[in-house]
Amino acid sequence: MPGPRPAGLVRAALRCYPPRWRSRHGDEAVELAALLMRDGVPVRSIACSYFMGAARARLAPGPRRRLGMAAGTLLVAAGALGIPLALLSSSAPANAASVIRARISNPGDAASQLESLLECSALLGENVKQALPALDSLHVKITWETDGGKPVRWPVPEGRYYVAGGTARSADSIAIRIAAKDPAPGNSAGNRGRRC
Amino acid sequence: MTTRERDRGDAADPDVLRRAGDASVLILTSLAGGSKHGYALIHDIKGFAGVQLGPGTLYGALDRLERLGLIEALPAQERRHPYRMTAAGAMALRAHLDSIERVSAAGRLRLGLAGI
């Protein structure tokens, strides 16, 4: 059924579900989100419900390992949803500041937060514009690098750029590698989020 | 105890829905009127209960009800999976509604609302 495409936030939430769940409900869940959005349900509400559902789905099987994954999902959810509305609707990256400065919840954990965010929220391969709010929620200083490793001075050049990776430079500084092509096209249910 | 073992234990309770959560009761009540897929369930529940179920809550409850054998998935229609209530689901819903009625009657009696 035709309808509006789910926002990146909803797609990120759906990627947090276990692969078995995604293979069974994934397509229907995308369509349901689109229909609810068409009905006027706020996208943040839909995404929040899916994030919470993903955490519960990861807790359901029982092993201790799942607890950490569920906690990671909630961390990503809190980060992804706890962002200013202005950022969600911004025309970034072209209009945004070159360095995002904010607080960091655990100064010694920037690398871990980055890794968790990139993989569990499936930001790898995500368009920079879509990924920016979630990246900002990390509350660390962010710089950008092209594929060649050369730092990009702000603004990030106009056009479609994708998140290709990231490196924690220090406790409060990360470098996000960006590429002009999606490094993992059509891989939404596969490698993306494989550690979640 | 695994989720599956816990679910089997729950299924032995005549009022299995007591611990299954409000969403499960709402879904079973909706399915008592006929098979539905997720979007139809959300709309129907909003109509008769005034509750907007979140999609994550919906799928969680559907999975749990299916594990309990109270509902079953019908063949997919395009991308949608309709569900229908099983005989066990009908029994569980009846037991739960009886339980709610007993609580409701006691509450009304104690509030002096009996017969109103």
Image (tube, rainbow, N blue to C red):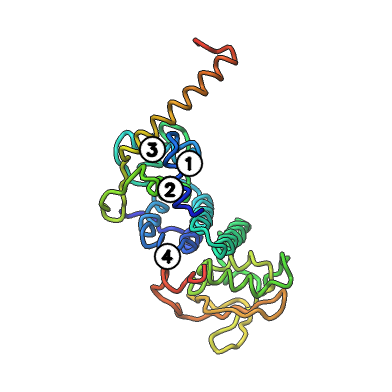
**Real-space Cα separation, disc 4 to disc 2, in angstroms:** 17 Å
Task: Tell me, yes or no, whether dots 4 and 2 are on the same chain.
Answer: no
Helix, strand, or loop for circle 1?
A: loop
- Mark 2 or 1 closer to N-term? 1
Work out whether A173 lies above or below A43: below
Q: Is residue B40 left or right of residue B22?
A: left
What kind of residue is marked 3?
A: Leu
Helix, strand, or loop for circle 2?
A: helix
- According to the image, label 1 marks what residue? B20
- According to the image, label 4 marks what residue? A19
What kind of residue is marked 1?
A: Ala
Name the subunit of mark 1: B
Task: Tell me, yes or no, whether dots 1 and 3 are on the same chain.
Answer: yes
What x and y, as percent, mark residue B92? 39, 35
> Dot 4, how many residues are within 10 Å of its Cα: few (below 14), some (14-19), or many (20+)?
some
- According to the image, label 2 marks what residue? B64
Determine contact: label 2, label 1, CB under 8 Å. Answer: yes
**Real-space Cα separation, disc 3 to disc 4, in angstroms:** 27 Å
* Residue A43 is at least partly visible in this image: no
- In the depicted view, which residue is nearer to us: A63 or B74? A63
Name the subunit of mark 2: B
- In the depicted view, which residue is nearer to us: B93 or A157? B93
- Mark 1 or 3 closer to N-term? 1
Task: Tell me, yes or no, whether dots 3 and 4 are on the same chain.
Answer: no
